[in-house]
């Protein structure tokens, strides 16, 4: 959503202000200004901030999770040092390196200076600050512990960022090797193999079955590569659009949990998101039902979202959270029973935090084991590919040379 710069007159404070606002159109900007009791001074000055330097490549200026982590950490430090909220935000404009986040922080400073609560101002930027983030800020404002909440948010988001970074870093090498093998294999099958097999077919002799299969596969890839490419692109587009439907997203989210080996990794990732988010919200004093609703939005998997939505109904009827978790096959028994213990002892946030740390360590161990397992599998596949090439091409050519 684009950012619009504007100059307006604040009727309450009787002064001119210049700020930015995120909106879908100029009409929406005018509506937002009217809600804030602001009068646009000059309509000609209303412009999309995307015209700023570098905004034409907005994908390069996208706000990354790391940017929000740094923002939260610096904001918390300044509030702990008793720097006022507005002044802290003004300082953060200069401290922030991301141009888009600079615009957002500048708008936050103007809106808070105009009398708006920080949580309400952040809620106007859902693409930058999630419901989870806004709810925690709101709890910090209510309790008067905004600095501690921001520091807690920074720690929580830093753990999430480190977890995803570890997984991406560990899987980069195997994915690169697999892609390289597939690329080399396609070049061999389309370019090299036809030239080698042409010699064998010209002799008119009886060819082994492996050679016939290799020649057939190579010929198919060479003649119908465009069809394979269309099918791959069509499959990618089909999966992408099917994920936008409720039924399609539920199917694919359930499917990735059933994938051998990797399904366990995804399951643990979603359990960490569930336990860590709910623990953070609970410790921030958010009402349990509201915390469950926010957690269901950020968990990232339709299967676990359905579980949380059923849990919300049970809690609203006066039942425990664990009543739904115990019945679900996608929630490990340890999680269900520990949550039950946490509810009974009144230490739900502590128990959830322990569970989050446990599954984060499980993910680290699983990723290390997966990387260790993938490397020999790649070597085995490479050895089999070389063996097939030798059996299908080299051996018949050797036999042909011996016969001559």
Image: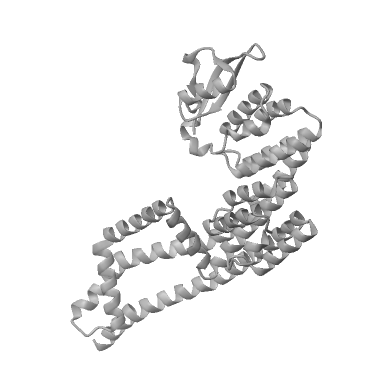
Q: Residue furthest right?
A: 81
Quadrant of the rendered image containing residue 201: bottom left
Q: Residue at x 71, y 26 (%)?
A: 86
Q: Is residue 43 left or right of residue 352?
A: left
Q: Residue furthest bottom?
A: 403
Q: Residue at x 57, y 34 (%)?
A: 125
Question: Along the line of sight, which residue is nearer the eye, 75 or 279?
Answer: 279
Visible residue check, residue 64? yes
Visible residue check, residue 95? no
Q: Quadrant of the C terminus?
A: bottom left
Residue 181 vertical position relative to residue 353 in the rendered view, above or below: below
Q: Residue at x 60, y 56 (%)?
A: 308
Q: How many numbered discs, if any?
A: 0
User: Whole-percent x and y of residue 85?
Assistant: 73, 29
User: Whole-percent x and y of residue 22?
Assistant: 53, 29
Question: Along the line of sight, which residue is nearer the eye, 196 or 37?
Answer: 37
Quadrant of the rendered image containing residue 348: bottom right
Q: Is residue 64 left or right of residue 183?
A: right
Quadrant of the rendered image containing residue 347: bottom right
User: Whole-percent x and y of residue 45?
Assistant: 50, 16
Scheme of colours in the image: one colour
Residue 381 vertical position relative to residue 113 in the rendered view, above or below: below
Question: Along the line of sight, which residue is nearer the eye, 329 or 390?
Answer: 329
Q: Residue at x 60, y 58 (%)?
A: 270
Question: Along the line of sight, which residue is nearer the eye, 63 or 354?
Answer: 354
Residue 28 vertical position relative to residue 14 in the rendered view, above or below: below
Residue 182 vertical position relative to residue 6 in the rendered view, above or below: below
């Amino acid at each position: 959503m684009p950012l619009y710069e504007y100059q307006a007159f604040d009727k309450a404070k009787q002064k001119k202000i210049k700020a930015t606002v995120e909106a879908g159109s100029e009409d929406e900007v005018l509506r937002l200004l009217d809600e804030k009791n602001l009068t646009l001074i000059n309509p000609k000055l209303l412009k999309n901030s995307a015209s700023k330097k570098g905004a034409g490549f907005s994908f390069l200026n996208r706000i990354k999770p790391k940017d929000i982590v740094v923002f939260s950490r610096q904001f918390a430090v300044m509030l702990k040092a008793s720097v006022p909220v507005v002044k802290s935000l003004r300082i953060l404009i200069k401290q922030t390196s991301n141009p888009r986040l600079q615009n957002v922080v500048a708008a936050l400073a103007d809106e808070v200076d105009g009398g708006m609560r920080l949580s309400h101002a952040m809620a106007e930027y859902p693409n930058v600050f999630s419901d989870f983030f806004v709810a925690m800020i709101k709890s910090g404002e209510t309790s008067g512990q905004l600095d501690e909440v921001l520091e807690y948010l920074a720690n929580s988001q830093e753990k999430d960022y480190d977890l995803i970074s570890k997984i991406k870093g560990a899987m980069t090498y195997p994915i690169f090797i697999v892609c390289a093998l597939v690329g080399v294999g396609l070049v061999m099958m389309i370019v090299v193999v036809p030239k080698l097999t042409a010699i064998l077919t010209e002799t008119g002799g009886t060819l082994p079955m492996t050679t016939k299969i290799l020649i057939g596969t190579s010929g198919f890839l060479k003649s119908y590569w465009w069809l394979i490419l269309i099918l791959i692109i069509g499959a990618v587009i089909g999966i992408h659009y099917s994920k936008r439907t409720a039924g399609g997203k539920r199917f694919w989210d359930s499917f990735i949990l059933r994938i051998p080996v990797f399904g366990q990794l995804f399951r643990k990732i979603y359990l960490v998101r569930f336990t860590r988010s709910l623990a953070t919200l609970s410790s921030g004093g958010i009402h349990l039902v509201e915390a469950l609703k926010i957690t269901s939005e950020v968990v990232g998997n339709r299967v676990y979202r359905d579980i949380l939505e059923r849990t919300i109904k049970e809690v609203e009827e006066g039942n425990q959270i664990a009543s739904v978790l115990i019945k679900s096959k996608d929630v490990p028994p340890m999680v269900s029973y520990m949550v039950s213990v946490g509810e009974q002892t009144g230490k739900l946030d502590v128990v959830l935090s322990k569970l989050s740390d446990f599954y984060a360590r499980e993910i680290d161990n699983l990723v290390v084991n997966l990387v260790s397992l993938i490397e020999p599998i790649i070597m085995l596949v490479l050895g089999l590919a070389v063996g097939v090439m030798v059996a299908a091409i080299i051996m018949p050519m050797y036999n042909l040379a011996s016969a001559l």
